[in-house]
Image (cartoon, grey):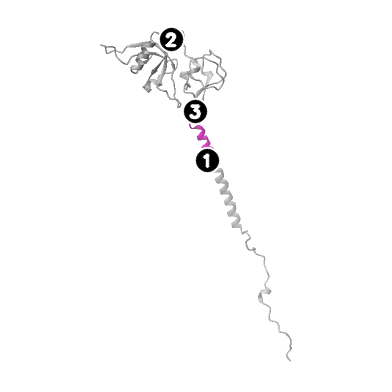
Amino acid sequence: MPISGPVRAPASGRGNLARFPGPRPGAPATSPFGALEAWRSRRRLRSIGALLLVLLAAALFVRDRMGTTTVLVATTDLVEGHQLAMSDVREVEAQVSVVPSSALLSWSEVEGQVLASPMGAGEILSSSRVDVPSDHTSDELRTVSVPVPDKGTLALLHPGAVVDIFSATPEPGSQTTRALAAGAKVKEVPRDSRGESAGTVAIQVPTGDAPAVAAAAVESPVILVLAE
C-alpha cells in the first residue's frame, strides 16, 4: 500500500562534499615561487642602490680633482727674512680659482729665496712674498717688465735666475746684437689663472741700464741669455 505524504527531492551531491579552505578573492599569492621572486626583487634594488652610491662617490671625487693645480705652501709659520729651504714648503693640490697668478709652482723657483714678509702655515707661496737676493742695493736697481714670446725661454726662467740682456736689433752698420745689461736677475715670472706664464717677466737691472732695456723691449723682443 503506498504511503502518502510529501515527497522530498534527493539531496544534491554538492552538499555531501567536504569544504576545503582556499585563498580568498584578492588575497596575495603565498606560493614559494612568489616569495622567491619578491626576495630577488629586493636584492636587485639593494644592488642598484649600492651601485648608485659608488657612482656618486666617484663623481664627487672627479669634481674635486678637476680645476686644480699643484702649488707650494708653507709647512709651518715662517718669519720675515727667513731663507727658504726644502723642508719649509710642501706641494698640495688647490683649486685654480684660489691660486694667485704669482704663485710659485716648483721648488726651483723657491730655493734660496728670502721671505719679504711673515707667512703662516699652509699659506700659498707667491713671488710677491719673497725678495730676490741681489748684490746691489734697491737704489741701484730698477725693475723692468720684459716681454718674452718664446715659451721655451719662459719655461727656463724663475725668480732669482741671472740673465744677460741683448737687443734683438743689431747695431747700425753691424750684424752683432747689442748688449743691454749683464748679470740682471729675474724678480718675477707672472702666471695666469691656469698657472701658465703670462708672457712677460719682471727683471731687476742696474739703474743705468734700465732706460735702454725698457726702450729695446718696446721696439722688439729682447734676447735673454741665462748666465747660470
Quarter of the picture holding the C terminus: top left
Q: Amino acid at mark 2?
A: Leu
Secondary element under disc 1, as helix, strand or loop, is helix
Looking at the picture, how far across and down is residue 144, in whole percent? 41, 14
Looking at the picture, how far across and down is residue 195, in whole percent? 45, 25
Looking at the picture, how far across and down is residue 84, in whole percent? 51, 16
Circle 3 residues within 10 Å: few <14, some 14–19, many ≥20? few
Rendered position, 100 above or below 212: below
Q: Quadrant of residue 3?
A: bottom right
Secondary element under disc 3, as helix, strand or loop, is helix
Residue pointed to by mark 3: 97
Secondary element under disc 2, as helix, strand or loop, is strand
Q: Residue most toward the left?
A: 173
Residue in view at x 42 percent, y 11 percent: 142
Residue in view at x 54 percent, y 38 percent: 57
The dominant secondary structure in magenta is helix
The mark that comes first in sequence, 3 or 1, is 1
Q: Amino acid at mark 1?
A: Leu
Region of the chain picked out in magenta, as a range: 57-67
Residue pointed to by mark 2: 141
Rendered position, 55 above or below 43: above
Res 223 visible: no
Q: Amino acid at mark 3?
A: Ser
Q: Nearer the viewer, mark 2 or mark 1?
A: 2
Residue pointed to by mark 1: 55
Left or right, 37 with reference to 206: right
